C-alpha cells in the first residue's frame, strides 16, 4: 500500500509541477508534509537543501529521498518512477505538438500565460522556506527570529547576486559559518 501511495503522490508532483523543481516544492510539501505526514516541515526543509546540493533535478531527488526514507530502496525506485513518468509522456507529446504547431499564436499565448503562475509558485515556495529558516516554524515575531539564519540569508543573497559567487561555495561557507556561530553563541 505504501508503494502505491508513494507512486501516486509523486505521480501528482510530476504531473502538476509546471516550471521545474522550484515550482514543484509546494506540491512536494503538500504531499509529504500535509497529506501524508511522512516528514515534518523541518525535515522537508532539510530534504530540499539536500536535493538542491545533489546532482539532478530537485523534484526527482526529493522523490528518491522521500521514497528511501519511507520504504527503502524499493520505495526510492517507485517514488522516482512516479515523479518522472508524467514528464516522459508529456514531453514526448508536447515535443510532437510543438514541432507541428510552433508557429500558431494561440500556443504562444498559452505559454506566455503560464510564466506568471510559475513565478508565483516559486515565490510561494521560497517564502515558505524563508519563514521556516527565520522563525523555525513559530509565529513571526521579532523575538522568534533566528538571527544566524537571517544573517546567512542576507550574506548568501549578496554573495550570489552582487558578487556572482559559486552557489556551492556559498552554501558551504554559510553552512560552516552557521555551525561555528551556533556552537559559539548559546541558544537563548
Image: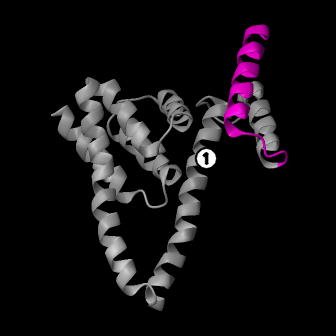
- In the displayed structure, 135 sits above or below 188; it is below
Q: Is residue 107 above or below residue 47?
A: below
Label 1, on which residue? 126
Q: Residues within 10 Å of mark 1 (few under 14, many from 20)?
A: some
Question: From where the camera sits, is residue 188 visible?
Answer: no
Q: Position of residue 63 (x, y in %)?
A: 37, 38
Q: In the rendered view, tell whether residue 89 sits above or below residue 147.
A: below
Is residue 36 visible in this depiction of the protein?
Answer: yes
Could you say which quadrant of the image residue 90 lies in?
Answer: bottom left
Residue 78 x/y as whole percent: 24, 38
* Residue at the image position 48 percent from the left and 55 percent from the top: 20
102 vs 46, nearest the viewer: 102
- Looking at the magenta stretch, what is its main secondary structure? helix
Q: Tell me where the magenta segment starts and ends, as one range.
A: 162-188
What colour scheme does the image use? one colour
Horizontal arrangement in the rendering, residue 70 relative to residue 26 (left or right): left
Residue 19 in the figure: left or right of residue 159: left
Quarter of the picture holding the N terminus: top left
Residue 11 colored magenta? no
Amino acid at each position: 500500500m505504501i508503494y502505491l501511495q508513494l507512486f501516486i503522490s509523486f505521480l501528482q508532483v510530476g504531473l502538476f509541477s509546471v516550471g521545474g523543481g522550484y515550482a514543484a516544492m509546494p506540491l512536494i510539501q503538500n504531499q509529504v508534509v500535509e497529506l501524508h505526514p511522512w516528514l515534518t516541515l523541518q525535515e522537508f526543509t532539510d530534504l530540499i537543501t539536500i536535493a538542491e546540493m545533489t546532482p539532478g533535478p530537485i523534484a526527482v531527488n526529493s522523490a528518491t529521498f522521500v521514497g528511501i526514507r519511507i520504504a527503502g530502496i524499493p520505495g526510492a525506485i517507485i517514488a522516482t518512477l512516479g515523479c518522472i513518468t508524467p514528464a516522459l509522456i508529456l514531453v514526448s507529446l508536447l515535443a510532437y505538438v510543438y514541432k507541428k504547431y510552433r508557429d500558431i499564436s494561440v500556443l504562444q499565448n498559452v505559454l506566455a500565460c503560464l510564466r506568471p503562475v510559475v513565478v508565483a509558485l516559486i515565490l510561494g515556495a521560497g517564502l515558505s522556506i524563508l519563514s521556516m529558516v527565520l522563525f523555525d516554524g513559530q509565529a513571526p515575531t521579532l523575538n522568534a527570529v533566528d538571527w544566524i539564519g537571517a544573517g546567512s540569508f542576507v550574506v548568501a543573497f549578496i554573495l550570489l547576486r552582487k558578487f556572482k559567487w559559486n552557489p556551492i561555495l556559498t552554501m558551504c561557507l554559510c553552512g560552516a559559518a552557521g555551525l561555528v556561530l551556533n556552537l559559539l553563541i548559546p541558544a537563548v
